[in-house]
Image (cartoon, rainbow, N blue to C red):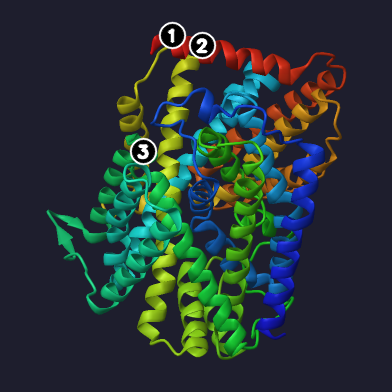
Amino acid sequence: MNSLLLAGIGVVMIIAGYLLYSRYLAGKVFVLDDSRPTPAHQFEDGVDYVPTNKYVLWGHHFTSVAGAAPIVGPAVAVIWGWLPAFLWVTLGTVFFAGMHDLGALWASIRNRGQSIGALSGRYIGARGRNLFLVVIFLLLLMVNAAFAVVIAGLLISTPTAVIPTWGALVVAVLIGQAIYRLRWNLPLVSVVGVIALYALIWVGNEVPLALPETVMGLPDDAVWIILLFVYAGIASMLPVWVLLQPRDYINGLQLFIALGILYGSVLIAHPGVVAPAWNSDVPEGTPSLVPLLFVTIACGAISGFHGMVSSGTSSKQLGKESDARFVGYFGAVGEGLLALGAIIATTAGFRTLADWENVYQAFNDGGVTAFVDGGGAIVEAGLGLPQSLSATIMATTAILFAATTMDTGVRLQRFVVQEMGDVAGFSLGKTSATVLAVGIALALTFGAGADGSGGMLIWPLFGTTNQLMAALTLAIIAIMLLRRGRSPLPALVPLVFVGAVTVYALFIQLGTFYRDQNWLLLVLDVVILIAAVWVIIESVGAMRRARSYDGDDDAELAQIAAEEAERIGGRR
């Protein structure tokens, strides 16, 4: 198979999904209506609720959901062959991820910008909400801790990426000031920002930076992890327009350009795909393709984390309802294209099948490194860029994806901690909730030693927990559709499929953890499995009640929102 043909088929399928299926969802299923005020306007506070240009918001949303996972998942899953990964990414993006991400955004903006965890209390019940919050908390803990470890590792292995990674923060703050304070023209700001970022990549390639092997008795990776959490904690408390929005927007442009560079290199060099389409000779110890493929590739096909971003931050910044199609569904399209790029980089970025097999000697051997090396080789062959600069571009792309996800993840963890405090009967302020969220993540990260490797302890459960979260989000969307008398099938079909393979995978992992005597993961797996089954039962009951619901859900929600907006206005 030629990589150009593979890329062409995949891109056409994904873009067709946006042009056709997302239009159907927006007009017939969710019935987006610009006459309805969005939470960003109703509760505007200049911190979390900020009406935002849809292109800027898309940049935040895309880079928040597209972390390292859409690179890592496909880069691991191609061990079963490129065809299963390709089909799951393309079809999953069109019919699963787009529906899920747009649906979560719609559900939240119709509910005062509330998170999926809060919505579960209204549509599933108090017990479902409490179990939902446990799953959300664990998922965010995995993302924040593991991504810190991944970013630190890349900063050490690719010191040329240090300057562009941290320099991007300065560029983002200046862009935020230019957009919101100086009111500069957005296209002009975008061009200047992208040029600045790529100038930083060139400088970084010329001036690599590395920490000493030990700093105050701590290894360099531990120092990077601490710095990343300090930064993420501070960023999560700042108004979104100061850093989060402009950082994610300009990173989104840079990252899309990086994808353009990768796909352009494929167009020019069109290397052959050396990996097998279907690998029947997988290394010993590789788990079965079904159901593990569908939880190994989560981000890039469908991901519960996306629903948390849609309902946690993006819904609070949406200027009008019709923007949800571009922000939500097209955000999923961007991630699908990244996952497709990862498949191509890790199957066509090697000279021979033997070279590919030398990397994929065991399950989980592929990953970000395979993407950086394979993608760098394709860019070098296609555009003639020096190998070091090509690798720097790919490494910076991976780091910025992961870092922007970590930024949003810590902010979402703060929201969840505050929600859990409300359920427990006590109120937590923004600072105390952030300190608690970061403290728990750091405790996990350094729980296994001073090098911070503990951040990967519970990562094996990420795929199943993430997909479970997606299934639960789809359940809420289906219930909301039923209460409005609309067909729930666009949500129910992916719900049943993802729910089934996830529960199946959880049972398989139980056996693996028991054989390995990994009691921590075994206990967590049991907790997640119980929560999953319990919430599924609660959701089925809620769907039955929704079928006979004779009220006007939108009217009720509009009245609640109006009363809350009036109370907020009175306090001001």
| Residue 300 as seen in the image, left or right of residue 491 | left
Distance between the alpha carbons at the discs numbered 2 and 1: 6 Å
Q: Which residue is mark 2?
A: 566
Q: Is residue 513 visible?
A: yes
The quarter of the rendered structure image containing the C terminus is: top left
Badge 1 amino acid: Gly
Badge 2 amino acid: Glu
SS of the residue under disc 2: helix
Question: Dot 2, crowdedness within 10 Å: few (<14), some or many (≥20)?
Answer: some
The quarter of the rendered structure image containing the N terminus is: bottom right
Badge 3 amino acid: Ser
Q: Which residue is mark 3?
A: 236
SS of the residue under disc 3: helix
Which sits earlier in the primary sequence, circle 3 or circle 2? 3
Image location (x, y in percent) of residue 559: 65, 13
Image location (x, y in percent) of residue 335: 59, 58
* Circle 2/circle 1 CB separation < 8 Å: yes
Distance between the alpha carbons at the discs numbered 3 and 2: 27 Å
Q: Which residue is mark 1?
A: 570
